């Protein structure tokens, strides 16, 4: 299964809300979550600075931007390709 990337930064309360929606779904899905602090990379700051939190799938263009709810998150995850 793919790795999920949560683009975030320190002190982002919306990022904390997004993480709270994502984490309960991880065990059953077999997915892992990696948090990426955009403040450590100028390119990421330019791309995501005003958009965070953004949930992305590693090595794909798939992204889910905030705001999202549990239903939207489940639909996004259901559309992920399976990897062997």
Image (cartoon, rainbow, N blue to C red):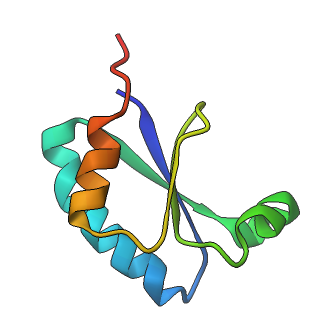
Left or right: 37 in relation to 84: right
Q: Residue at x 61, y 76 (%)?
A: 9
Front-lying residue, 36 or 45: 45
Instruction: Name the quadrant of the C terminus.
Output: top left
**Percent x, y for residue 35?**
51, 59
The image quadrant that residue 60 belongs to is top right
Residue furthest top as drawn = 84
The image quadrant that residue 11 belongs to is bottom right
Q: Residue at x 26, y 38 (%)?
A: 78
Residue furthest left as drawn = 28
30 is higher (above) or lower (below) than 63: above
**Percent x, y for residue 53?**
53, 71
**Percent x, y for residue 33?**
40, 50
Left or right: 7 in relation to 27: right
**Percent x, y for residue 82?**
33, 20
Q: Residue at x 79, y 69 (%)?
A: 45
């Amino acid at each position: 299964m793919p790795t999920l990337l949560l683009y975030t930064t320190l002190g982002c309360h919306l990022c904390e809300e997004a993480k709270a929606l994502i984490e309960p779904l991880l065990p059953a899905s077999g997915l892992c979550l990696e948090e990426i602090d955009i403040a450590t990379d100028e390119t990421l700051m330019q791309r995501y600075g005003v958009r965070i939190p953004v949930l992305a799938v590693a090595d794909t263009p798939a992204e889910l931007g905030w705001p999202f709810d549990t239903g939207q998150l489940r639909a996004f995850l259901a559309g992920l390709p399976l990897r062997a």
